[in-house]
Image (tube, grey):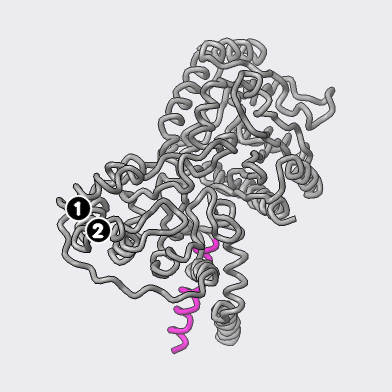
Amino acid sequence: MRRLTGVFVAFGLIALLAAGAARAEELIMVRSPQPFPETIDALQRLIQEHGYKVQRVQRVDVGLAAKGFKTDFYRVVFFGKPEETRRLANLHPELIPYLPLKIVVFAEENTTLALTNNPVLLGTFFKDSELAVYFRRWERDIRSILDHVAND
Amino acid sequence: MSSKTSSFVQAVLVALLAALSLSWADPARARHEGSHLYAQHCSACHGADGHGGVGVPLALPDFLAIVSDDYLRNSIRFGRPGRVMPSFAHLTDAEIEAIVRHMRGWYKGERRAAVKIGKGDAKKGEKTYKRNCAGCHGPEGEGGRGTGLTFSRPRDLPVLAPALNNPGFHAAADEQLIKATLIHGRQGTPMMSFLKMGLSEADIDDVVAFVRSLGKKRAPASARVLDSESAVLVRRSPHDVATTVEKVKNAMAAANMSVIRAVPFDEGMVDKKLENRKRIIIDGCDFNFLNQALTVDPRVGLFLPCRITVTEDAGRVLVMAVNPKRLSTIFNNSELNAMCEQMHEVYTLILEDATL
């Protein structure tokens, strides 16, 4: 009986762990009920409140409009922790194309969509236990930032 | 480990498992969790209250009155490969159940009685389908085009017609759902009641048989997601960083890209005098291509700008870019496949030109 309980417990735990390990979605996306200007201001503030520095904001809409294309607001916000970004780029140069982190923000009438790829999924390609710790933290922080964007 | 310690550990683990399962057994808690999970995973596309947006509206009475819990569970679990709706297979059964319970809370009315499924003729059904359904759902059941995201551009239809040939649809839908939808239509969407439009129940059974036959065919191209063998494209340059940067700029121009800027990777992150001049990013853009890509899927900005990085690493000069085929996987949108493959070729060409 005790052996059976042990097997049951082990099975249950494996199932729980397997479920935990698989907990990742490729794209993290939220919709803010606020218009674009308020949302992008809030996003930049939240990024800083989470301990990151906004490196720059790429104004995709401005580039498109300059070429004659009709467009609504569309920006890409690049951000990171300077020392962390520098260190990881030195240690793992192959990671550079995915650095710094970024969030895409664009208007859809009176609402705003904000999205990014899930950093944890980078672990599929960059198999390194130290990096995995960063990827998990970035995911947690990004989810927190975007949760606030959607709900504040 | 002594048998006493082992028993203690087992008892703690059993208690932990029991606590976890009990927490989901409480319906009020499950609904609360469902609301939270729905907000986290579904609301950006389907709307906070299920009234749609990117994704189809879920809170429609005509939908919730006929749909089974299994359909909802399996749609969440398997998604629609290549059709934007991702698979949420990473959610646990309990989490999926909680989302389903939350969705059920949107509709308090009666569930419609089951419809009787007759033996349909798929060949006849195909003819009826082509006359009545193909206009929205496509001749082969490939569904409407686009993502449902408008990026404030005009929408052709208020709802994207679902792909009836998608393996995810067939993993979720049964004959009951297909026939009931054809009989009752779905108010609030362009889907009409085909019974009211003059089709007989026998005609509808034929269409059900035809739609079902679509699921037995090989997965269509619209359900294909590109494989990406690596996350980055890398080449080693025989030149120094400055020469390689100039070569990249020339190669980008040759590929019809406007070079926007070539700056240190850490510009804006560190003080000007601390910038690493041996690690340069070259941003470019083919605005015509970008405009087309945004029309197909406004989310593609995630891979903007078109960026090539030149970096010195342990005496080597590397030239790198993200692998655009990753886009297809991330966005689960087969309409992007051709564009991702094209960008993959363009990036490869630039990298090879610059490192000759």
Is residue B79 found left or right of A72 in the rendered image?
left
The image quarter containing residue B35 is: bottom right
**Residue B1 visible to an observer of this rendering:** no
Q: Which disc number belongs to residue B208?
A: 2
Is residue B101 found left or right of A32 in the rendered image?
left
The magenta-colored residue range is A1-20
Q: For the image shown, how many numbered marks are present on the structure?
A: 2
Q: Amino acid at mark 2?
A: Val
Q: Amino acid at mark 1?
A: Gly
Marks 1 and 2: in contact by CB < 8 Å?
Answer: yes
Tell me the residue that label 1 is attached to: B125
- In this orientation, which residue lies closer to the viewer: B277 or A69? A69
Other residues around mark 1 within 10 Å, as few (<14) / some (14–19) / many (≥20): many
Distance of mark 2 from mark 1, alpha carbons? 7 Å
- Is the same chain shared between marks 2 and 1? yes
- In this orientation, which residue lies closer to the viewer: B76 or B22? B76
As helix, strand or loop, the secondary structure at mark 1 comes to: helix
Q: Position of residue B231 (x, y in %)?
A: 52, 36
Q: Which residue is drawn at the image coordinates 78% and 29% (left, top)? A: B268
As helix, strand or loop, the secondary structure at mark 2 comes to: helix
**Residue B43 visible to an observer of this rendering:** yes
Which chain does tag 2 point to?
Answer: B
Q: Position of residue A70 (x, y in %)?
A: 60, 26
**Residue A10 lies within the magenta run:** yes
Task: Report the predominant secondary structure element of the magenta stretch.
Answer: helix
Q: Which residue is drawn at the image coordinates 47% and 56% (left, top)? A: B188
